[in-house]
Image (cartoon, rainbow, N blue to C red):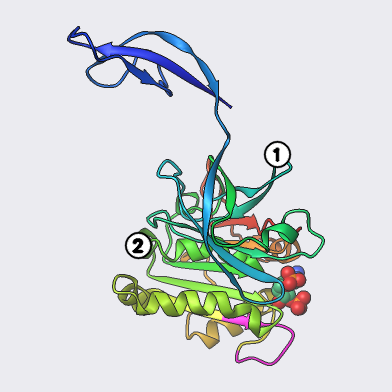
Amino acid sequence: MREFYYLCERRDGQAGFPLYVSHLRAVERPPVDFVYVRSIGTRHMSAFYREKVLAVRHWTDTLFSFRATRDTGFRFQNGQFAMIGLEIDGRPLLRAYSMASANHEEELEFFSIKVQDGPLTSRLQKIREGDIILVGRKATGTLIADNLIPGKRLLLLSTGTGLAPFASLIKDPEVYDRYETIVLVHGCRQVAELAYGEELVANLRDDELFGPLLADKLLYYPTVTREPFRNRGRITDLITSNQLFNDIDQAPLDLETDRIMMCGGPAMLEDLRKLFEARDFTEGSHSAPGHFVIEKAFVER
Ligand code: A2P
């Protein structure tokens, strides 16, 4: 990526105030009080921010999370993802990661799997406090509130690290403004894999600002498929059988009121898409909001 530099001067003509502007988006619009003089060349700019790792937590043999510094110029909407990675032998090695932190937080947080022979995660899982990670400058993604038509109940359906974008969204006060009820469902094979989500929700319940919002509106439903737990079963089955809604004392699925975001494994997403489309729910996007939006949980290796 190239960075363009321009020379500007004070509008009042007073000498001594040349201003070198790296990003003059439209040449006809220099900063207030300055006038454009001429271009003074270009310079290569890294496509990445270099951020410092602040903390790493290992949750299971296959899951870890980490926090890093955040450049003040890095903007994103809650629920979006960016390219994250490491510099290996002078080259960037990157994968898409949803931000698990909210956009009002000073630091960045990510929730990742560990794959022992995965090109990135085999290395990333070894990061320590003080190490440098690369963060792509541009965030994007479909799991944003504006891609859904207005509704009353928001279902956030996730498996595994697909929880990450929802960790960000449940820290967004605007989401609580838009919906009367938010149901966060997290499905995993084993109970230990729920720990990150359990702690996240417990901390938010204790938070001065979010505590009352969560108490009023958030229903958290962790479920496990391969060992005993209070909630058991796949998300697809829990919806078709109505078990999910019965367990949380809520009305069944309703096209009029329910809006859905989902993130997780590809097979689950495909089955959920079929399930919702068979009930007349439509997929939303940036150009046309709908009843549900989908993002796969990216990091597989
Ligand atoms: P199961 O244990 O029955 O396969 P994974 O670790 O493979 O990504 O799975 C995470 C969770 O998603 C598991 O609880 C798994 O259930 C569930 N899952 C996998 N495939 C589907 C699917 N097609 N529909 C619903 N849930 C699924």
For the record, the magenta segment spans 222-230
Q: Nearer the viewer, residue 278 or 87?
A: 87
Q: Position of residue 102 (x, y in %)?
A: 44, 58
Q: Position of residue 263 (x, y in %)?
A: 62, 62
Q: Is residue 243 above or below residue 179?
A: below
Residue 173's disc number? 2
Residue labelled with disc 1: 90
- Of the two numbered discs 1 and 2 on the same chain, state the one appearing first in sequence: 1
Task: Tell me what residue is drawn at x 64 percent, y 91 percent.
Answer: 229
Can residue 259 be seen from the camera position used here? no
Can residue 81 be seen from the camera position used here? yes
Q: Is residue 227 above or below residue 193?
A: below
Asked if residue 164 is among those painted magenta in the image, a careful observer would answer: no
Q: Nearer the viewer, residue 89 or 236?
A: 89
Q: Is residue 111 above or below residue 12?
A: below
Residue 44: image quadrant is top right
- Dot 2, how many residues are within 10 Å of its Cα: few (below 14), some (14-19), or many (20+)? few
Please, what is the three-letter code of the amino acid marked with disc 2?
Pro
Quadrant in the picture for the C terminus: bottom right
